[in-house]
Image (tube, rainbow, N blue to C red):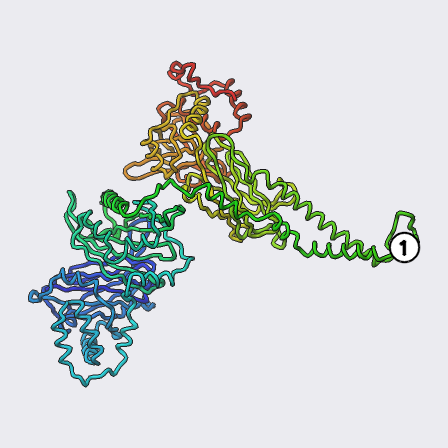
C-alpha cells in the first residue's frame, strides 16, 4: 500500500527560512528550503510504502529552521511537529484526507517553546493495489491542487476521533460545501463521473447553515489568472520602482546578448503560455513529455506570478533520462524590466536530492537607439543551491556548468533565428548623443536672467533709480558746515544711512557681476573643444547633477565639475545658484598613448579663483569594471560628508574609443620596450580573450607578459602573474581553491626588491606596496597591511627574477611616474649596480636589450 503525503504550505511561522521533514515508520524525506517568507509554499508530494494501517502508526511532520554556518553547510532547529494518525486517514471517504490546516505543536525544548508556531496545510491519501490510480498520475495531478475548499483543523491533531467526527460533520453541512470537496477530489483523482453521481444523490433540501464556504474562499493564498497578460498587469500595478532588479546569480553568466525587440515582447515570447519558442527549444534539446502548468498569482509580501513546468530530460553518457521540475517565479515585472527566477530540481540524477540548479532571466531595455525600433538586453545567470553537504559537490558543479553551457548555446542559436542580435560592443551613437546634448543647452541670456533675479539686485536697481530721479528733482544745496566746493556731505544722519545702504547694495551687485563674468569667461576653455591626435579618445557628456550639497547648508552655491584622467584635467562650466544643475555639455580629452584606467570626478563650489573652490563631492570611475553600455548611461553617486548625506549624483555619458586601432597598441609597446630594454609582442587574440574573460575585463584591455610564480601569504600559493597595459593580476587554482585578484598600476606606491632569506627558501622577493586605501578589492591576496593602511604583496620564485623585476619596474614607472621623476631615478640607477643580477643574465644581455632604464 502506498501513502501519498502532500505538503502544500504553511502560515504564520516564527522564522523565514524553513523546510519540512517527514517520518513514516523507518522512512524519512524532506522538502526544499523556502527563504525570505514566514508563509512558505512547497507544493511537494512524497510517496511512502506502508504494509498496513495499525493503531499507533503516525505520520510525523516536522517544521525546521534552515541556517547557514561556517563549519557545516546546513544546521537546523525544530520549530514544531504535527502527528497525523494513519487510522484517521483510512477512516476518511476514499481513504483521502482533504487539504486541512493543522496547528503546529510546540516543541518540548528550545527557543520556540513559548511561541505560537503557526499552521501547516497537509493532504494525505492511502492507495492500495486495487486502486486504478497510479503514482505517476497522482504526481502529475499534484500541480492542479487548488486551495479552494481547504478546511482548518482547530483541535489538536493528536485526537483522531474528535477530528474525524468534525470533518464528517462538515462534509454534510451543505450543498455548496460539498461542491468544493467534490471539485477537490476531482482535481486530485480525476473521477468526474463518480463524483457527479454522488453529488446528484444529495438531498435537495439541504441548505448552507454556516460560513464555511466564505472561510474556505478566504483561506486561499493563490489564484489562477485569467490570462498571462493580466497577471503581468497585476504585478506591474503592485510592483514598486524602488524594488531593485535582483543581482546575477554567483555561478556565472550563461547568456548576455542584445536583441532588436522591445523588452515586453521578448518577455512574452519566452514565457507566455504555449510559447512556440519553448516547444521548438524542447525539440532541439530532446526534451519529452513537457507539461506547462498555468501561471498563478501568489499573494505573499509581494504579488508574484508563478508556474511549474515538468519534462523528461534525455539520457547522456553519464546520466540516465530523468524527470525535471522547474518552478518559475517572476521576481520583477515593472515597466520594461522583467526578472524570472527558475529553480530546477532533478531528483532522478545521482545525488539529485542534495541540490537544485537555479537560473535567473533578466530582460532589460537596451541602450541602443536604432532605426529598426526598440532593443532589449537578455542576461541569464545560474547558480546551484545545495540542501545538504556532499563530497561530490565539485563534480556536481562541474557537470551542471557543462550541461547548462551546452543547453544555452542551443537556446541562443534558436533565439537568434527569431530576433536580430546586436553587437554587444555597440553602444549609443556618440555623434547622436553629442548632438542631442548640445541642442538641450540652456541659452546664456536665460541663465543670466535667473542668476540676477534676486532680491538684492532688484532692491539695488529700485533704490538707484529712486535716487537718480530724486537728484534730477532737487536743486543744488548751499555749501554749509565743513563742505567746500566739490565736496557734498550728507546733511543728516538719515542721508548718511541711506547712502550707506545704497553703497552696500551697489557693492553686492558689483560682486555678483564680477562673479558672473568670471564664470562665463571660464566656460569656453574646455567645453566643446575637440580632441586632437590619434590614440585613446575620451569623450564625456555631462548631463546634470542631482541634490548637490553645499558646505554651508544656508548658502546657495555655484557648482562646476573637474575631470582628471591620466594626469590631464578638464573643467565644466559653472552653474550659478543651482542645486540641481543642468549642464548638457560635451568635454573631450586629447588623444592619449596609454589607455586610461580611472577617471576622477570632483564637484566644486565656484568662489573666485578655481583653485580655491570648496569640494561638494567626488567620485572615481574605473573603466575596467564598467562595460561600454554602462558607461554610455552612467549615474555616479558622489562621495563626501555632505554629498552622501544628500545622496548627490551626477549623470554622465562616457565614450572611450581608440582612433588609431592596433597602431596605438604598437606605439605603446614600442614606448614600453625602450624603458624595459626587452622586446614585447602583442599576444594572440585567443590569449587576450581568455585573459579578459578570466578577470572580467573590457575588450580593449591587452596582455603584455605573464609569469609563473608564488604568491607569499601564510602559505605560498603557486599561480600566474599577468601584466597588462593597465593592471597587475594574479590567478591560482589549486584543487578547486581559486585565488584571483588584480589592481591598477596607478594604485602602486612602491616596488622593492628584497634579498633572499631562509624564509623565502633562498629566493629573492618582489614586494609591491599599494597606496593608502587603494586596491581594496585585492585585499585577501595581500600578506600584510601596514599602519598607514597600505597593502603589501610578496611574489617570489620567478624563472628569471632579474628580467621579471626590470620589466615590472619599467612598466610601473612608465605608467605612473612623471618625466622628471623617471629621469632622476634613471640617473640614480646608473650609479648603483643591481645586487641580484645573475651572471648568466649579464652574459646573455645584448646591446639591443640593455638592462638599464633609458634616460628621459
The quadrant of the picture occupied by the N terminus is bottom left
Identity of the residue drawn at 38% across and 53% down? 245
Residue drawn 38% across and 50% down? Answer: 365
User: In what element is the residue under mark 1?
Assistant: loop
Q: Furthest-front residue in view? A: 371
Which residue occupies 49% across, 39% down?
Answer: 539
Q: Residues within 10 Å of mark 1 (few under 14, many from 20)?
A: few
Q: Is residue 541 above or below residue 3?
A: above
Q: Which residue is mark 1?
A: 477
The image shows residue 242 at horizontal and vertical percentages of: 43, 57
Q: Position of residue 669 (x, y in %)?
A: 42, 25
Residue placed most toward the observer, 541 or 705: 541
* Residue 646 in the figure: left or right of residue 658: right
Is residue 643 rendered to the left or right of residue 105?
Answer: right
In the rendered view, tell whether residue 558 sits above or below residue 300.
above
Q: Position of residue 511 (x, y in %)?
A: 70, 47
Q: Residue 26 or 332: which is nearer the viewer? A: 332
Amino acid at each position: 500500500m502506498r501513502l501519498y503525503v502532500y505538503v502544500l504550505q504553511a502560515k504564520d511561522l516564527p522564522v523565514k527560512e524553513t523546510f519540512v521533514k517527514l517520518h513514516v515508520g523507518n522512512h524519512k524525506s524532506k522538502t526544499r528550503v523556502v527563504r525570505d517568507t514566514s508563509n512558505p509554499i512547497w507544493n511537494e508530494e512524497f510517496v511512502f510504502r506502508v504494509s498496513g494501517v495499525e493503531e499507533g502508526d503516525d505520520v510525523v511532520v516536522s517544521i525546521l529552521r534552515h541556517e547557514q554556518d561556517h563549519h557545516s553547510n546546513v544546521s537546523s532547529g525544530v520549530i514544531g511537529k504535527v502527528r497525523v494518525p494513519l487510522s484517521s486517514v483510512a477512516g476518511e471517504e476514499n481513504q483521502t484526507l482533504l487539504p486541512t490546516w493543522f496547528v503546529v505543536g510546540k516543541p518540548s525544548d528550545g527557543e520556540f517553546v513559548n511561541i505560537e508556531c503557526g499552521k501547516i496545510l497537509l493532504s494525505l491519501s492511502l492507495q492500495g493495489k486495487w486502486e486504478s490510480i497510479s503514482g505517476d498520475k497522482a504526481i502529475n495531478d499534484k500541480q492542479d491542487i487548488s486551495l479552494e475548499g481547504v478546511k482548518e483543523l482547530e483541535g489538536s491533531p493528536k485526537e483522531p476521533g474528535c477530528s474525524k467526527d468534525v470533518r464528517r460533520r462538515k462534509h454534510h453541512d451543505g450543498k455548496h460545501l460539498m461542491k468544493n470537496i467534490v471539485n477537490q477530489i476531482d482535481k486530485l483523482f480525476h473521477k468526474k463521473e463518480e463524483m457527479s453521481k454522488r453529488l446528484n444523490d444529495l438531498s435537495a433540501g439541504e441548505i448552507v447553515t454556516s460560513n464555511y464556504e466564505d472561510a474556505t474562499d478566504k483561506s486561499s493564498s493563490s489564484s489562477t489568472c485569467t490570462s498571462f497578460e493580466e497577471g503581468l498587469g497585476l504585478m506591474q500595478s503592485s510592483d514598486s520602482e524602488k524594488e531593485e532588479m535582483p543581482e546575477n546569480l554567483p555561478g556565472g553568466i550563461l547568456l548576455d546578448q542584445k536583441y532588436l525587440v522591445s523588452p515586453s515582447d521578448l518577455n512574452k515570447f519566452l514565457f507566455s503560455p504555449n510559447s512556440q519558442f519553448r516547444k521548438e527549444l524542447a525539440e532541439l534539446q530532446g526534451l519529452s513529455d513537457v507539461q506547462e502548468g498555468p501561471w498563478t498569482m501568489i499573494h505573499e509580501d509581494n504579488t508574484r506570478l508563478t508556474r511549474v513546468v515538468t519534462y523528461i530530460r534525455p539520457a547522456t553518457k553519464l546520466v540516465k533520462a530523468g524527470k525535471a521540475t522547474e518552478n518559475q517565479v517572476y521576481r520583477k515585472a515593472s515597466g520594461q524590466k522583467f526578472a524570472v527566477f527558475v529553480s530546477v530540481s532533478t531528483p532522478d540524477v545521482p545525488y539529485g536530492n542534495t541540490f537544485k540548479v537555479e537560473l535567473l532571466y533578466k530582460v532589460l531595455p537596451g541602450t541602443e537607439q536604432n532605426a529598426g525600433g526598440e532593443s532589449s538586453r537578455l542576461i541569464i545567470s545560474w547558480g546551484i543551491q545545495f540542501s545538504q553537504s556532499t563530497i561530490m559537490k565539485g563534480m556536481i558543479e562541474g557537470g551542471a556548468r557543462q550541461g547548462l553551457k551546452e543547453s544555452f548555446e542551443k537556446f541562443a542559436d534558436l533565439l537568434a533565428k527569431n530576433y536580430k542580435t546586436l553587437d554587444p560592443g555597440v553602444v549609443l551613437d556618440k555623434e547622436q548623443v553629442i548632438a542631442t546634448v548640445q541642442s538641450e543647452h540652456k541659452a546664456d541670456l536665460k541663465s543670466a536672467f535667473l542668476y540676477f533675479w534676486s532680491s538684492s539686485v532688484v532692491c539695488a536697481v529700485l533704490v538707484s533709480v529712486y535716487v537718480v530721479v530724486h537728484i534730477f528733482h532737487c536743486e543744488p544745496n548751499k555749501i554749509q558746515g565743513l563742505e567746500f566746493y566739490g565736496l557734498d556731505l550728507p546733511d543728516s544722519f538719515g542721508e548718511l544711512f541711506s547712502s550707506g545702504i545704497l553703497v552696500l547694495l551697489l557693492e553686492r551687485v558689483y560682486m555678483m557681476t564680477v562673479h558672473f563674468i568670471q564664470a562665463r569667461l571660464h566656460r569656453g576653455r574646455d567645453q566643446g573643444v575637440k580632441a586632437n591626435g590619434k590614440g585613446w579618445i575620451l569623450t564625456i557628456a555631462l548631463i546634470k547633477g542631482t541634490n548637490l550639497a553645499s558646505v554651508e547648508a544656508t548658502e546657495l552655491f555655484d557648482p562646476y565639475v573637474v575631470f582628471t584622467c591620466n594626469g590631464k584635467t578638464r573643467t565644466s562650466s559653472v552653474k550659478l545658484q543651482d542645486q540641481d544643475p543642468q549642464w548638457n555639455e560635451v568635454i573631450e580629452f586629447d588623444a592619449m598613448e596609454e589607455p586610461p584606467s580611472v577617471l576622477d570626478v570632483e564637484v566644486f563650489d565656484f568662489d573666485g579663483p578655481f583653485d580655491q573652490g570648496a569640494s561638494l563631492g567626488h567620485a572615481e570611475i574605473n573603466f575596467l569594471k564598467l562595460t561600454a553600455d554602462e558607461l554610455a548611461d552612467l549615474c555616479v553617486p558622489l562621495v563626501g560628508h555632505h554629498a552622501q548625506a544628500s545622496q548627490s549624483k551626477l549623470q554622465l555619458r562616457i565614450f572611450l574609443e581608440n582612433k588609431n586601432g592596433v597602431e596605438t597598441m604598437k606605439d605603446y609597446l614600442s614606448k614600453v620596450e625602450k624603458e624595459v630594454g626587452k622586446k614585447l609582442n602583442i599576444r594572440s587574440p585567443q590569449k587576450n580573450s581568455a585573459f579578459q574573460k578570466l578577470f572580467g575585463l573590457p575588450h580593449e584591455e591587452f596582455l603584455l607578459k605573464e609569469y609563473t610564480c608564488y604568491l607569499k601569504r601564510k602559505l605560498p600559493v603557486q599561480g600566474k602573474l599577468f601584466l597588462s597595459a593597465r593592471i597587475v593580476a594574479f590567478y591560482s587554482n589549486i584543487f578547486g581553491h581559486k585565488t584571483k585578484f588584480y589592481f591598477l598600476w596607478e594604485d602602486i606606491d612602491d616596488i622593492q626588491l628584497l634579498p633572499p632569506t631562509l624564509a623565502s627558501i633562498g629566493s629573492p622577493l618582489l614586494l609591491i606596496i599599494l597606496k593608502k586605501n587603494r586596491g581594496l578589492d585585492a585585499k585577501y591576496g595581500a600578506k600584510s597591511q601596514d599602519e598607514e593602511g597600505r597593502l603589501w604583496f610578496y611574489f617570489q620564485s620567478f624563472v628569471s627574477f632579474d628580467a621579471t623585476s626590470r620589466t615590472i619596474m619599467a612598466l610601473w614607472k612608465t605608467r605612473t611616474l612623471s618625466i622628471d621623476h623617471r629621469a632622476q631615478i634613471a640617473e640614480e640607477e646608473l650609479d648603483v649596480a643591481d645586487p641580484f643580477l645573475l651572471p648568466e643574465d649579464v652574459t646573455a644581455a645584448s646591446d639591443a636589450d640593455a638592462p638599464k632604464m633609458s634616460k628621459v
